[in-house]
Amino acid sequence: MRFEDALAAAGSATLKPGDLTVLQLNLGKLCNMTCAHCHVDAGPHRTEVMTRETMEACLRVLEACRAEVVDVTGGAPELNAHFRWLVDECRARGARVMDRCNLSVLLTAGRTDLPEWLAAREVEVVASLPHYRRRNTDRQRGDGAFDKSLEALRRLNRAGYGQGDPKRRLSLVCNPVGAFLAPPQAEAEAEWKRGLREEHGIAFDRLIALNNMPISRYLAWLEASGNLDAYMSLLVNSFNPAAIEGLMCRNTLSVSWDGRLYDCDFNQMLELESRPAGGRAARLADFDPAAFAARDIVVGRHCFGCTAGAGSSCGGALA
Ligand code: SF4
Ligand code: SF4
């Protein structure tokens, strides 16, 4: 089944955007890690990073679209030389900032002060941790990743994160270590909070449970392990129309490191550019809020990853 057919069966001929509230900026593919499930194909040797000039164009778009939230991602966004400047400029424009952080980057040279620095600017830290148990996390992120993640979480806790303060919100993102759907989010959150507190004395505010998307490195793993057909069938058979309303592409504009515009981070990785109405180019310099509000969102089979089960988005479960 095509995703378009599933949408049509649910009563939507096309997928239309709602209000644009989130501007997601991908600062590049440079990362200190090389995770097996990475949909960005990021790593230490990638050279694609957003320049200051492109960031300045992003800020002009932020002023034009008045998004409430700037969601900063990568790679490891903190490795971009202009990361701190960008955060300050977004805050100066009244936007809330979310930093999608891999945790271990907080232990790298020149970035150990980031927990306090981010806390002073009320930046939400959205940290990826595949599982609260060592074996599962190291399997996906590499040996030693779990211990580094815990040390970074302790530092964030000491900076005031994860204690229920909305100005120091610490969210953890988990994704299945295998070819199955994300666990029920509320149950998993309770289990993770208990596990991290009792076994490691670590606190966090909320858990975001994501389905793995069948693209990039995870797609390669599905193919190599013989799980691709079964996983795609699982996604299609778990299609949940109730997840459509909250799909992140409906309220987000995603900007690539080189200034191209996409409906979401996944489409960005697949190089499926946005198609603003009137045939305008999907570039920062051509951004026109009305043309973007009138567009059809570009969809494909990978979208079944967002609508399977309880649904899956940058903010977690949808239904
Ligand atoms: S999943 Fe995140 S931390 Fe891992 S390589 Fe990709 S961008 Fe880096
Ligand atoms: S992958 Fe998900 S967020 Fe992206 S366009 Fe498809 S449904 Fe929307």
Image (cartoon, rainbow, N blue to C red):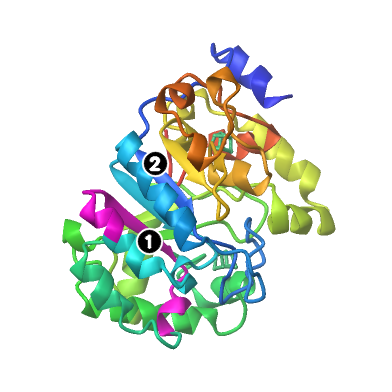
> In which quadrant of the rendered image does the N terminus lie?
top right
Amino acid type shown at disc 1: Asp
Residue at 58% over, 69% down: 30
Give x and y (percent) for residue 96: 26, 51
Question: Left or right of 91: which side holds 313?
Answer: right
What residue is pinned by disc 2?
61
What range is drawn magenta here? Answer: 89-107
Residue at 57% over, 35% down: 282
Residue at 46% over, 52% down: 25
Report the disc number at residue 219: none
Mark 1: few, some, or many residues within 10 Å (few <14, many ≥20)? many
Residue 124 in sight here: no
Q: Is residue 92 magenta?
A: yes
Question: Left or right of 117: which side holds 130?
Answer: right
104 and 74: which is toward the camera:
74
Locate residue 207: give its quadrant. bottom left
Give x and y (percent) for residue 116: 24, 77
Q: In terms of secondary structure, where does tag 1 sit?
A: strand
> In which quadrant of the rendered image does the C terminus lie?
top left
